[in-house]
């Protein structure tokens, strides 16, 4: 396949992540509601919410600067690009060769940076509180993610996601304790970063312990739609990242035919559904933590990342 | 030795280090004791696998002793002591969890640097086991330093001894007699410590070891 083929796969990938991300959020909500024996919202409700928000008038606070208006688009752009870099149904994406796991981490970090700035921009006390908490969590979550990236890079010999996925498929992997630790650490980071239950409750507004919602409290209309869509994209991104690294089966290899890509898409949808069910199960079985317990929870992820790197040195440094 | 058996040995020994970290993370006494029992089970698995790999049948006995004493007898005894003393609430840590974890990571890296340098040229499996064993020993010491409650200090001491057993099985040729006598001395230590726990409680109405410092006039 030439450049056109690669480009079309990359564009399909970008559209797939954009279109599937509200569906994943809706699916998690439905499963959670069913587990609580409620009927829950329809599966397509997140799409309707987004369309409704996009049509509404955007009201901006009096003291807001240009940053407040620009931030939703910047956050969305950074998250979308990061999501486009993770192989979902096919490896060897066109963009994936120019950027690796560290770039994805950095893009997510800049999205967080703008969100925290926007939270502080209007000057309400809730926004500042949310930003300060987000930064407190980020100081542990980001190093943890970087350590996990280092572990994967040391094991697979590359930070390139396509190469990592290829390595995980090969018999070279063997049985490694470091990989298990990296998986648990990555799941903890993903839960914290997506404001899921033990850390933050995605279903409530106006609660004293909220983090993510506190920062975006002042947004409305299309700005809020952008923010919502980017947080849905972020959830999809983390799920795809975990699926791509730890369950890479079904990914279409480079230069594969059309049928392989179809298999890849089917496998990807299956993985998303499994992840959604697991996430909903996890969220209904644990209680939310106190905010000041969260650093301990994230500290475990950081510890696992560091320990995984160290253990990797002992196994192959001999 | 083929790669799979090395990988399994690495998996189990690495799991032992991980469980040592989980011991540091616990702040409830019963959870701490359960985690200690889990550590003993992982150690027994590790020793059993070593027995299979090294083709050394006496190591199976070591594994059985570990499983019986450390995974069942000692945790059950400590459970009873804790329940009798009525202290199954919180463990007061001197240092908060995250700094303790970071100190633990520093100790693990220290032991890897030291052991991998010192044992150059030795068998790969022995080197790896020695490095992990030193980490478990140091983590046990760290636990004894950071806890004030006497029971969690006892658990720290016992987990330190688990590290010693891992080292002994990794380096081939520890006689069975030594093994058994170590196991029994641990049991005797448990009995002595149990008596002391009750004595401490009788005298100071708590098993917080800071009370000892205060009675000696050494408190801050």
Image (tube, rainbow, N blue to C red):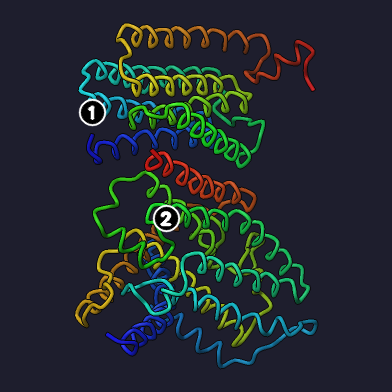
Q: CA distance from mark 2 to mark 1?
A: 29 Å
Number of numbered tags placed on the structure image: 2
Q: Closest to the observer: B129 or B176?
A: B129
**Both labels 2 and 1 in a single chain:** no
At 32% across and 22% down in the image, what residue appears? B67
Q: Which residue is mark 1?
A: B53
Q: Is residue B73 left or right of residue A46?
A: left
Chain containing the residue with disc 1:
B
Secondary structure category for the residue under label 1:
helix
At 61% across and 59% down in the image, what residue appears? A138
Q: Position of residue A49 (x, y in %)?
A: 50, 83
Q: Position of residue B211 (x, y in %)?
A: 71, 17
At 45% across and 58% down in the image, what residue appears? A283
Locate residue B146: give its quadrant: top right
At 30% across and 71% down in the image, what residue appears? A268
Q: Position of residue B88 (x, y in %)?
A: 54, 27
Q: Closest to the observer: A277 or B172?
A: B172
Q: Residues within 10 Å of mark 1 (few under 14, many from 20)?
A: some
Q: Quadrant of the C terminus of chain A?
A: top left
Q: Which residue is mark 2?
A: A152
Q: Position of residue B212 (x, y in %)?
A: 70, 14
Secondary structure category for the residue under label 2:
helix
One can see residue B77 in this view: yes
One can see residue A42 in this view: no
Name the disc covering residue A266, or none: none
Q: Is residue A131 above or below residue A149?
A: below
Q: Closest to the observer: A59 or A235?
A: A235
Q: Closest to the observer: B96 or B176?
A: B176
Locate residue A239: give its quadrant: bottom left
Q: Is residue B106 above or below residue A192?
A: above
């Amino acid at each position: 396949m030439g450049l056109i083929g690669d480009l079309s796969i990359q564009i399909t990938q970008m559209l797939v992540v954009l279109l599937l991300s509200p569906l994943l959020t809706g699916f998690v909500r439905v499963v959670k509601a069913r587990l609580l024996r409620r009927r829950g919202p329809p599966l397509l409700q997140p799409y309707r919410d987004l369309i409704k928000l996009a049509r509404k008038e955007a009201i901006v606070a009096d003291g807001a600067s240009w940053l407040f208006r620009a931030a939703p688009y910047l956050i969305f752009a950074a998250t979308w690009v990061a999501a486009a870099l993770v192989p979902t149904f096919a490896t060897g994406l066109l963009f994936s060769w120019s950027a690796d796991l560290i770039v994805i981490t950095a893009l997510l970090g800049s999205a967080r940076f703008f969100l925290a700035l926007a939270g502080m921009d209007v000057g309400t006390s809730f926004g500042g509180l949310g930003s300060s908490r987000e930064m407190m969590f980020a100081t542990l979550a980001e190093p943890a993610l970087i350590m996990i990236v280092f572990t994967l890079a040391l094991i697979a010999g590359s930070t390139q996601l396509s190469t990592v996925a290829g390595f995980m498929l090969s018999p070279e992997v063997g049985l490694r304790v470091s990989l298990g630790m990296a998986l648990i650490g990555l799941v903890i980071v993903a839960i914290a970063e997506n404001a899921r239950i033990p850390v933050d409750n995605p279903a409530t507004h106006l609660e004293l312990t909220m983090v993510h919602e506190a920062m975006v409290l002042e947004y409305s209309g299309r700005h809020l739609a952008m923010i919502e869509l980017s947080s849905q994209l972020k959830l999809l991104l983390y799920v795809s990242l975990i699926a791509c690294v730890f369950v890479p089966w079904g990914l279409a290899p480079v230069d594969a035919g059309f049928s392989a890509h179809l298999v890849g898409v089917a496998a990807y949808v299956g993985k998303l559904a499994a992840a959604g069910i697991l996430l909903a199960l996890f969220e209904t079985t644990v209680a939310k933590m106190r905010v000041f317990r969260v650093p301990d929870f994230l500290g475990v992820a950081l510890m696992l990342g560091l320990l995984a790197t160290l253990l990797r040195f002992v196994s192959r440094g001999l | 030795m083929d790669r799979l058996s090395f990988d399994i040995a690495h998996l189990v020994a690495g799991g032992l280090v991980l469980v040592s970290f989980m011991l540091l993370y616990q702040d409830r006494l019963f959870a701490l004791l359960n985690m200690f029992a889990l550590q003993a089970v992982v150690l027994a698995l590790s020793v059993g696998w070593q027995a299979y790999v090294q083709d050394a049948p006496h190591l199976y006995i070591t594994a059985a002793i570990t499983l019986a004493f450390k995974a069942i007898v000692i945790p059950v005894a400590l459970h009873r002591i804790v329940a009798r003393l009525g202290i199954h609430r919180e463990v007061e840590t001197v240092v908060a969890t995250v700094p303790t974890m970071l100190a633990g990571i520093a100790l693990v890296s220290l032991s890897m640097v030291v052991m991998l340098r010192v044992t150059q040229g030795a068998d790969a499996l022995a080197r790896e086991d020695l490095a992990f064993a030193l980490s478990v020993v140091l983590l046990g010491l760290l636990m004894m330093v950071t806890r004030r409650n006497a029971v969690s200090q006892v658990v720290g001491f016992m987990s330190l001894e688990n590290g010693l057993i891992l080292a002994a099985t990794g380096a081939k040729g520890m006689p069975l007699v030594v093994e058994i006598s170590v196991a029994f001395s641990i049991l005797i230590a448990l009995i002595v410590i149990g008596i002391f726990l009750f004595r401490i409680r009788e005298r100071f109405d708590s098993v917080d070891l800071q009370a000892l410092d205060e009675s000696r006039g050494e408190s801050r």
